[in-house]
Amino acid sequence: MKILEERILKDGKALDNNILKVDSFLNHQVDPKLMKDIGYEFANYFKNKNITKVVTIESSGIAPALMVADILNVPLVILKKQTSKTLNNNVYTTAVTSFTKGITYNLTVSKDYILSSDNVLIIDDFLANGEAASGALRLLEMGKATCTGIGIVIEKSFQPGIEKLKKLGIDVYSLARIKKLEKDTIVFE
Ligand code: G4P
């Protein structure tokens, strides 16, 4: 997606070989107009897949995912990293380890919102090692829902996540694919 690549080059910053800082428009301060364009791009790609729900992982996936859900006219379900007191025990839970952040958390969702009749589109901001996406897939499996596709705003193609998901036969659509990062240098596929 050209406007996203241009924005990454203009406002993003490669901190080192692994981390791209995009917190002026994607994951701290958020540009709603760009999120809307991203929403239309994903919605257009997945429009004929009978999506019944969009699922994302809190917190940075929420902004683009909400736009997609709105355009597809389906609910957005947010997978929680911290169990809410209102959730009681009616939940599916799986442990996820983030290599980027060096932490493990329990990804949780109410059983009420993942149904065996659901065709789910997963949306997330970054695909790095694929651990968050794999955790989301495990929760969908627990609810016997179908994952129809995964939409990623920024894929770091040089990290293992994309290959992991492709091996599972999932249709992954990434809007910006980064081949290489070096301090102050960003190279797209
Ligand atoms: P994975 O999900 O693909 O396995 O990636 P990993 O566990 O290694 O890291 C996941 C977290 O790190 C995610 O944030 C993701 O957005 C963030 N992340 C990964 N690579 C980058 C990067 O190059 N730049 C930035 N800015 N973030 C990156 P999270 O823990 O889910 O937190 P949140 O921001 O969504 O709240």
Image (cartoon, rainbow, N blue to C red):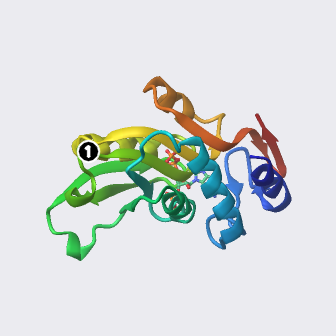
Q: Where is residue 161 in the image (x, y as percent from the top left)?
A: 53, 36
**Depth check, front residue: 159 or 50:** 50
The kind of residue on which mark 1 rests is Ser
Q: In this view, does 73 lie above or below 155?
A: below
Q: Is 154 on the left-hand or right-hand side of 104?
A: right
Q: Is disc 1 placed on a helix, strand or loop? A: loop
Give 145 or 83, whichever is nearer the viewer. 145
Q: Residue at left 44%, top 56%?
A: 56
Measured from the top left, where is residue 78 in percent x and y?
A: 39, 62
In this picture, residue 28 sits left or right of residue 102: right
Residue 181: give x, y in percent of width and height.
76, 43
Question: Taking 138 as reference, is 59 left or right?
Answer: right
In this picture, is 13 found above or below 120? below
Q: Which of 64 and 10 is in front in this view?
A: 64
- Residue 30 percent across, percent down from the top left: 65, 71
The answer to which image quadrant residue 172 occupies is: top right
**Numbered label tally:** 1
Whether residue 31 is visible here, answered yes or no, is no
Among the 4 quarters of the image, the one containing residue 84: bottom left
Residue at 64%, 63% (x, y): give it. 35
Residue at (74%, 50%) from the top-left corner?
16
Q: Which of 138 and 53 is in front in this view?
A: 53
Location of the C terminus (image quadrant) = top right
Q: In this view, does 42 lie above or below 148?
A: below
- Residue 110 visible at all: yes
User: Which residue reaches farthest left?
Assistant: 89
Residue at 61% x, 65% y: name it.
27
Residue 158 found in image quarter = top right
- Left or right: where does residue 42 sit relative to residue 123? right
In the picture shown, does residue 60 fall above or below 180?
Answer: below
Residue placed under numbered mark 1 in the picture: 117
